[in-house]
């Protein structure tokens, strides 16, 4: 089963991205999505080439945002695709069954389609406004998650759902109560001055109801 915490990287340069990813791994993240927007293919490749062995060293999953070809070229663990990116069924045909494919959703119908098309997990959002991403879909809020997760249960649709968008520590427990599997966060980890402590607290809340 996938970890309940996914770190989405930030940084305007290759160096800053690598620094942020290294810091997140060092502080205990074991799932990284490399999100490096508006870059040349060369820079994205250079970064991915450095992130891959780093994630291997920390025994962390490494997925790439948007770029199917880079995912294959670098042999990353998978890719995350949005509603306007390559279609999930095309990605599955291209990458095969061994790679993780995550898909963005904003509605119950988006999730239904993704499941039919062979998606492995869902990034459902945005939870609230965030400056990390431009052109946000409609904000869901807690009630949006509650309604969608209830509908999934009613329709016996089972797929790990990650909440995303402006999530802070105090949002985690109420979000988990809606039935989501975990969270995908960028800002709170990147900007934290006490990353190890924050990640520990996030994980305590994310895994609070797991009996070992
Ligand atoms: C886990 C997760 N969920 C949603 C997104 C958003 O993807 P997308 O809508 O394609 O937006 P960009 O991240 O590409 O700007 C995500 N990246 N990760
Ligand atoms: C990539 C993405 N997609 C929807 S919200 C978002 C940004 C998540 O980052 P943050 O945790 O900083 O709001
Ligand atoms: Mg995208």
Image: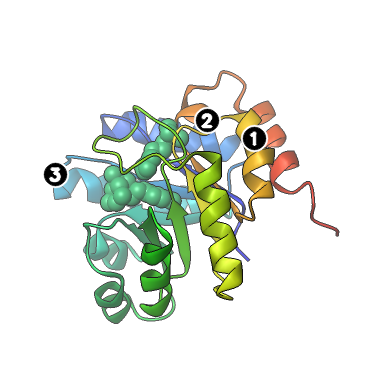
Q: Secondary structure at mark 3?
A: loop
> Of label 1 and label 3, which has the lower sequence position?
3
Residue at the far left: name it.
40
In the image shown, does 58 or 36 lie closer to the viewer? 36
Disc 1: which residue: 199
Looking at the image, which is closer to me, 72 or 201? 201
Q: Quadrant of the C terminus?
A: bottom right
Q: Earlier in the sequence, mark 1 or mark 2?
A: 2
Residue 76 in view of the camera: no
The 10 Å Cα crowd at callout 3, few under 14, some 14 to 19, many 20 or more, is few
Q: Is residue 91 visible?
A: yes
The residue where tag 3 is placed is 40
Choose top left, top right, bottom left or bottom right for residue 118. Answer: bottom left
Where is residue 191? Give x, y as percent: 48, 22
User: Which residue corresponds to the image point at 58% horizontal and 55% vertical from the top-left?
Assistant: 59
Residue of label 2: 189
* Residue at the image position 31 percent from the left and 71 percent from the top: 88
Res. 92 mark: none
Name the side, left or right, on which 11 lies relative to 208.
left
- Which comes before the other along the chain, label 2 or label 3? 3
Q: CA distance from mark 1 to mark 2?
A: 8 Å
């Amino acid at each position: 089963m996938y970890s309940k915490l996914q770190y989405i990287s930030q940084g305007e340069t290759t160096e800053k991205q690598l620094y942020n990813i290294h810091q997140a791994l060092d502080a205990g993240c074991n799932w990284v999505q490399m999100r490096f927007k508006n870059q040349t293919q060369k820079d994205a490749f250079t970064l991915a080439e450095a992130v891959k062995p780093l994630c291997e060293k920390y025994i962390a999953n490494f997925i790439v945002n948007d770029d199917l070809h880079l995912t294959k070229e670098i042999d990353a663990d998978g890719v995350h695709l949005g509603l306007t990116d390559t279609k999930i069924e095309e990605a599955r045909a291209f990458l095969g069954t061994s790679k993780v494919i995550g898909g963005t959703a904003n509605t119950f119908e988006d999730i239904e389609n993704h499941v039919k098309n062979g998606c492995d997990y869902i990034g459902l959002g945005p939870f609230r406004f965030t400056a990390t991403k431009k052109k946000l879909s409609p904000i869901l809020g807690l009630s949006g998650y509650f309604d969608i997760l209830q509908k999934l249960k009613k329709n016996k649709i089972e797929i790990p759902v990650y909440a995303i968008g402006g999530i802070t520590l105090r949002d985690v427990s109420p979000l988990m109560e809606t039935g989501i599997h975990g969270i995908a966060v960028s800002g709170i980890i990147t900007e934290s001055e006490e990353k190890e402590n924050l990640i520990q607290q996030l994980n305590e809340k994310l895994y609070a109801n797991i009996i070992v």
